Image (spheres, rainbow, N blue to C red):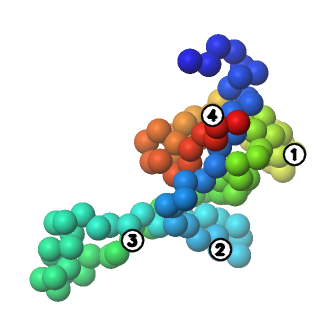
Amino acid sequence: MLNNNEEVLSIIFQISDSLEYEVDKDNIVTILEKQDHKVQNFFRKLKFRIPEYKRISLDEYGSCAFLQIDGKKTVKDIGENLEAKYGDKAHPLYERLLLFLNYIDVNCHYIEKTNF
């Protein structure tokens, strides 16, 4: 369990090796989630048109934060870069950022904490 703000801000994330994503010309990230459940595969064999990937596009802030996750930058570094780029529009900065990072870590498994 993390005890204070400094520990939380010093967490370093990396993008999961198994994650597939695309970045468009505007630096908007689209996550590609493979849909390979056995029921989906069964219906594909019956010629149902079920897409192979579910496409999830992140917004401008989420894309900017996601593209900074490199296994080297801390949460604090990412927050400072967001504030430099978006200014007051990014506030409440760390509350939003930590909520986003926690969600894509715990619920989606797009990122993982490094062991540094």
Residue tagged 3? 53
The disc, 1 or 2, on the residue closer to the chain's N-terminal end is 2
Q: Secondary structure at mark 4?
A: helix
Tally of numbered tags: 4
The disc, 2 or 4, on the residue closer to the chain's N-terminal end is 2
* Direction top: furthest residue: 3
Residue tagged 1? 84
- Taking the spot 71% from the left edge, 53% from the top edge, the residue there is 70
List x then y, in percent, for residue 51: 33, 76
Residue tagged 2? 24
Residue 101 seen in the figure: yes
Q: Amino acid at mark 2?
A: Asp
Q: Which mark is residue 98?
A: 4
Q: Of 21 and 62, which appears nearest the observer? A: 21
Q: Amino acid at mark 3?
A: Tyr
Q: Amino acid at mark 1?
A: Ala
Distance between the alpha carbons at the discs numbered 1 and 2: 22 Å
Quarter occupied by residue 39? bottom left
- Taking the spot 56% from the left edge, 18% from the top edge, the residue there is 1
Mark 1: few, some, or many residues within 10 Å (few <14, many ≥20)? few
